[in-house]
Structures are given as C-alpha cells and as structure tokens.
Image: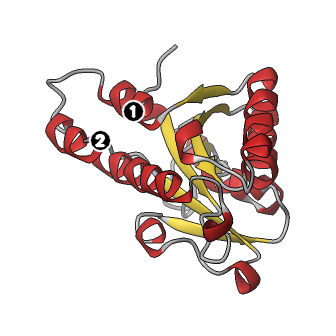
C-alpha cells in the first residue's frame, strides 16, 4: 500500500518555540517538518497544525505555521479530543434551498458528503505524548495513519523510539520524509517532480 496525494492530509503536531530547543535532533526534525509542509503544498495536500498550550509553549515555528490552513490550539494532549477530527473529516451538510422553488422530490434535505481524504500523514513533538495520543485517536476514528519518523522526536531518544514501537504495534505505518515525497509523486514525470526534488536535496 502506497500513499496517494489525492487521499492525504498532513498534520503537524506541536513544533513550538519553547519546546523545540529541548527536543532530541531538533534541527533535523524541524527541517523535515518544513519539507513535508512544502511538499504537501506542491501536491495540493491540505496541511493542519496543532499547538499545545500555546500561551505557555509559544506558537509553532513561523515557517510551519505559515504553511498550515489552520492551527488548533489545544490543552488536551490529543488534538482529536479538541476537534481535529472534525477538521479532517468535516460533518455531512444538508442541502439548503427554498421549498417553493424546489421540485417536490428535492424539498427534503439531502446529505452532501465532502470529498473525503482518509489518509493522515502526521509528524510532531513530543512523539511519545501529543503525537502518539493524536495518532492513536485518529486510528480509532478509522483514519489511515502514517507517522513520519524523521520529522518526529521527543526530549529523549528513548521516549521517541518507544513511541514508534507502540505506534507500529497499533497498526500505524512508519515512513520517512523522502518516502512520503516519492509516494506522493509516484513518477519522475509528475509536474511537481523537479520542485519536490529540490526540496529533498
């Protein structure tokens, strides 16, 4: 099973100003998160962010925040507990209309489902807390969840690795930034190939 850009959404979890300096391999992790967000924009993949208690931990890195459609401020460790799932899978809306102007068979409200992107590519900090809890809740909500390991970390390597072990055991796919890029592209003939390749190099 390979990632499909047309079915994907990207979630960037808590790359915050006061958290990142204490994160293991923080420069590489932040650089890969930025690459992911830029690749997502090239491929027309929606990008969402979360921030844990931003009044205490600060906002996400500005280069990431600028690439997100919306950023969810949260106090719960899982973004899903604070409504992230509704952003990723908007509720079905009823068709509105003037009853007098509609034919009889259209007068009852009908459900209209938005185009669904059921694959969530997710990365962030801390891997063993907010990322883990958000990813597991998304899995429980029947999303396909792919965690980008080289764009995730914790304050310690041991906590980060324990998170990856637990996520893999739960059925989450573990990938790298380059795996995501080349699966979204699929071919050297993709119109965004050169721009994507430049980001990766």
Q: CA distance from mark 1 to mark 2?
A: 7 Å
Q: Is residue 141 visible?
A: no
Q: Nearer the viewer, residue 164 or 85?
A: 164
Q: Is 119 displayed left or right of 127 in the figure?
A: left
| SS for callout 2 | helix
Farthest-out residue, top: 1
Total number of numbered discs in the rendering: 2
**Which of the labelled discs sits on residue 193, or is there none?**
none
| SS for callout 1 | helix
How is colour applied across the structure in the image?
A: secondary structure
Determine crowd level at label 1: few under 14, some 14-19, many 20+ residues with C-alpha closer than 10 A.
some
Q: Residue at x 58, y 62 (%)?
A: 49
Q: Is 6 displayed left or right of 73 in the figure?
A: left
Quadrant position of residue 76: bottom right
Quadrant position of residue 83: bottom right
Read off the residue under disc 1.
Answer: 178
Image coordinates of residue 176 in percent, x first then y, are 49, 33
Read off the residue under disc 2.
Answer: 200
Relative to 62, residue 9 above or below: above
Quadrant position of residue 19: bottom right
Q: Residue at x 34, y 53 (%)?
A: 38
Q: Nearer the viewer, residue 57 or 5?
A: 57
Image coordinates of residue 18 in percent, x first then y, are 66, 77
Image coordinates of residue 6 in percent, x first then y, are 40, 34
Relative to 194, residue 18 above or below: below
Q: Are marks 1 and 2 in contact (CB under 8 Å)?
A: yes
Of mark 1 and mark 2, the one earlier in the sequence is 1
Image coordinates of residue 199 in percent, x first then y, are 26, 47
């Amino acid at each position: 099973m390979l990632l499909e850009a047309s079915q994907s959404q990207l979630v960037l979890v808590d790359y915050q100003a006061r958290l990142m300096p204490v994160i293991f391999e923080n420069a590489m992790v932040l650089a890969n998160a930025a690459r992911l967000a830029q690749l997502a924009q090239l491929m027309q993949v929606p990008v969402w962010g979360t921030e844990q208690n931003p009044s205490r931990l600060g906002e996400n890195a500005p280069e990431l925040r600028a690439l997100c459609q919306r950023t969810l401020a949260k106090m719960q460790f899982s973004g899903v507990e604070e409504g992230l799932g509704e952003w990723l899978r908007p509720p079905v809306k009823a068709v509105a209309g003037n009853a007098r102007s509609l034919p009889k068979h259209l007068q009852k409200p009908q459900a209209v489902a938005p185009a669904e992107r059921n694959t969530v590519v997710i990365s962030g900090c801390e891997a063993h807390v907010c990322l883990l809890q958000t990813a597991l809740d998304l899995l429980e909500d029947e999303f396909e969840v792919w965690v980008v390991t080289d764009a995730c970390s914790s304050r310690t390597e041991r906590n980060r690795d324990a998170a990856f072990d637990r996520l893999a055991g739960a059925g989450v796919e573990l990938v790298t930034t380059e795996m995501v890029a080349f699966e979204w592209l699929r071919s050297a003939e993709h119109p965004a190939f050169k721009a994507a390749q430049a980001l990766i190099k």
